[in-house]
Image (cartoon, rainbow, N blue to C red):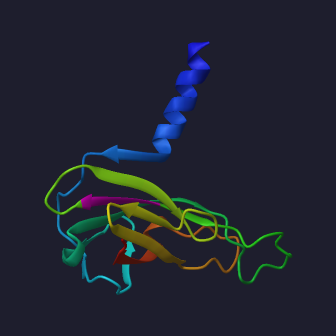
Amino acid sequence: MRTPWLLTLTLVLGCASTVGPDLSGTFAVAANLGEPFTLKVGQRARIDDADLAVRFVEVVGDSRCPSNALILCVWEGDGAILVEIAPLGGGDARADTLHTTLDPKWVLMGTVLLELLQVDPYPTDFTPIPLDAYEATFTVRMVR
């Protein structure tokens, strides 16, 4: 009886986890509050105005309907990516999956909101997109 409960707890906690921040390496982008910025998979941005580091960890899934599809798609599909946000000065990081169509499209850390604006390239056919070709565009803003 314990196994299903532990499995459920693991799945729930795994969807939004707090992990040690990966602040090693350099930042690909220095962004400002309210200004869109773009990251490739594995790249990190620093947002000094918000004392925040953002990392595009991986593409979780891409079921978006291809723009040149010869079939009629039942729905537009969804692009899902894993992001990590952490304070620049160190401390706990937060990893979350953000979506292009489904929710959540944003994550809140304190009074800082990170929003996924788009994932590129948009599929044109059913050919898989190489992971290193993906780019995600975000914006960061302060909320009360």
Examine the rendered structure and indicate whether residue 131 appears above or below residue 136.
above
Q: Position of residue 34 (x, y in %)?
A: 35, 85
Q: Is residue 84 above or below residue 27?
A: above
Residue 121 falls inside the magenta stretch = no
Where is residue 5, by image quadrant? top right
Residue at point 19% right, 51% down? Answer: 91
x and y percent of residue 33 in the render? 30, 82
User: Residue 118, image x and y in percent?
Assistant: 52, 78
Q: Residue at x 83, y 69 (%)?
A: 74
Viewer-closest of 70 and 34: 34
The secondary structure that dominates the magenta segment is strand
Horizontal placement of 4 versus 60: left or right? Answer: right
Up-down: is 69 above or below 62? Answer: below
Answer left or right for 103 relative to 14: right
Report the residue at 24% width, 54% height from top.
22
Q: Nearer the viewer, residue 144 or 110?
A: 144
- In the image: residue 41, left or right of residue 125: left
Q: Residue furthest front?
A: 144
Quarter of the picture holding the N terminus: top right
Task: Tell which residue pokes out farthest to the left in this image.
Answer: 89
First to last magenta residue range? 82-86
Query: Within the image, what quadrant is residue 26 found in?
Result: bottom left
Q: Nearer the viewer, residue 15 or 22?
A: 15
Whole-percent x, y for residue 141 in the image: 35, 77
- Image quarter of the C terminus: bottom left
Residue placed farthest to the top in the image?
1
Q: Residue at x 55, y 62 (%)?
A: 104
Residue 37 image-quadrant placement: bottom left
Q: How many callouts does the rendering have? A: 0
Q: Was residue 83 drawn as part of the magenta stretch in this picture? A: yes
